[in-house]
């Protein structure tokens, strides 16, 4: 049974729409995929909950997935999972080099200044990214924070199925790690990473020499689904199917407007709203960092497969688009037949992260 061998790493990504699970093992300098599964939590007429599934849905689903993969929860030795949402934040700052104890104390104060949460008790962690190229006395630090309640709620969820919480990462970093471990980053300029989830999308900007930046965008796959439901009179399951098979301009009759106002007719599409949010984020990044050379988009997440989205982004920003399939970077001892491999990026990134 998996979980007995110490060289296996498990990555777990619990989203608001589906649970993704990946098991990898280190074989020499490479990683090999041992098992993987993605399981949707809203099927057969069940209504999507944008706040995320209740424990009564998610816990049995995860237990079933582990049983199917032959995983014994209490025997898993190396687990990495992730948290995200508005109660999680990450920011790069510059700081004087200090001892570990001094750094931990001072960064808690910095987190409260740089990463506004909800005023409750904060859990903070950091990673030194290297010397600050603008100030030789300082170092670049990636600062991450969440609320104590959010952190402990995630741990309690894992313990409910007898999983010992291991590494807990931030979802934006999990997908980024998956990419940069296996891909060559450009020497100049920065790449734009866009992870499109069900409830929200996460935009991150990263380059070898430039400031790291990440921001949650309040637009995800569910907004696209709701647009199709509203415009074409589809139910949830029909809209989900149309979204991935035909895109946002399907060859079906639109629902009658019945005298709706001209304002509703002029409302921006979900594509346009997403484009505006990205544009706003990139303008802020240029202002803060001084870097304006964007080399390419890297699309990940369940919504990356949305028909014509890559074309829209490429045309709007005049930047090449890469749909990142994490399976292509791994050896595998199991057949990989995935309709949407892009949603597995964070889970695989977490499993690899568990090696550190």
Image: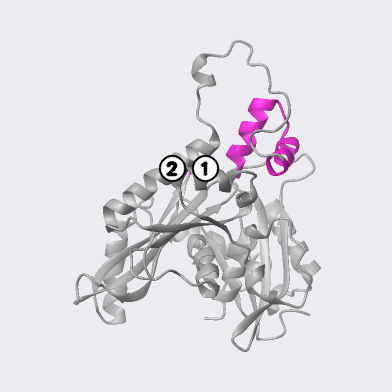
Q: Residues within 10 Å of mark 1 (few under 14, many from 20)?
A: many
User: Which secondary structure dominates the residues rendered in magenta?
Assistant: helix
Q: How many marks?
A: 2
Sequence-wise, which precedes: disc 2 or disc 1? 1
Q: Residues within 10 Å of mark 2 (few under 14, many from 20)?
A: some
Q: Is residue 220 visible?
A: no
Q: Secondary structure at mark 2?
A: helix
Check disc 1 and report the residue beneath it.
Answer: 219
In front of the other: 108 or 352: 352
- Give left or right: position of 204 versus 59: left
Q: Is residue 94 visible?
A: yes
Check disc 2 and report the residue beneath it.
Answer: 277
> Magenta segment, which residues?
218-245
Figure quadrant of residue 312: top right
Q: Are the residues flagged by discs 2 and 1 in contact, CB closer than 8 Å?
A: yes
In the rendered image, residue 187 lying in the magenta stretch gets the answer no
Q: Which residue appears at 70% of the width and 39% of the height?
A: 246
Q: Secondary structure at mark 1?
A: loop
How are the colours assigned in the image? one colour
In this rendering, which labeled residue sits more in front, label 2 or label 1?
A: 2
């Amino acid at each position: 049974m998996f979980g007995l061998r110490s060289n296996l790493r498990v990555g777990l990504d619990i989203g608001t729409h589906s649970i993704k699970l990946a098991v990898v093992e280190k074989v020499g300098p490479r990683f090999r995929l041992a098992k993987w599964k993605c399981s949707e939590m809203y099927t057969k007429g069940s209504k999507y909950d944008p706040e995320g599934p209740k424990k009564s849905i998610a816990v049995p689903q995860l237990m079933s997935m582990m049983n199917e993969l032959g995983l014994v929860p209490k025997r898993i030795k190396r687990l990495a999972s992730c948290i995200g949402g508005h109660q999680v934040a990450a920011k790069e700052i510059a700081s004087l080099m200090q001892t570990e104890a001094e750094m931990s104390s001072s960064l808690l104060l910095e987190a409260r200044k740089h990463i506004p949460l909800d005023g409750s008790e904060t859990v903070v962690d950091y990673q030194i990214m290297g010397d600050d190229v603008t100030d030789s006395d300082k170092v670049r630090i990636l600062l991450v924070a969440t609320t104590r309640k959010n952190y402990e709620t995630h741990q309690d969820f894992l313990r409910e199925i007898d999983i010992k919480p291991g590494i807990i990462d931030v979802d934006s970093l999990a997908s980024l790690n998956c990419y940069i471990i296996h891909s060559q980053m450009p020497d100049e300029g920065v790449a734009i990473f866009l992870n499109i989830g069900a409830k929200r999308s996460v935009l991150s900007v990263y380059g070898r020499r430039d400031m790291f930046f990440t921001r949650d965008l309040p637009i995800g796959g569910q907004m696209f689904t709701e647009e199709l439901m509203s415009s074409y009179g589809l139910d949830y399951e029909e809209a989900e199917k149309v979204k991935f098979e035909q895109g946002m301009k399907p060859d079906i009759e639109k629902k009658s407007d019945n005298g709706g106002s001209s304002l509703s007719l002029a409302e921006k599409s979900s594509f346009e709203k997403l484009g505006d949010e990205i544009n706003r984020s990139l303008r802020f990044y240029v202002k803060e960092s001084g870097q304006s050379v964007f080399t390419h988009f890297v699309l990940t997440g369940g919504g990356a497969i949305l028909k014509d989205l890559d074309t829209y982004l490429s045309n709007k920003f005049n930047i090449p688009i890469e749909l990142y399939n994490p399976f292509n970077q791994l050896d595998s001892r199991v057949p990989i037949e995935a309709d949407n491999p892009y949603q597995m990026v964070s889970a695989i990134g977490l499993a690899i992260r568990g090696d550190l």
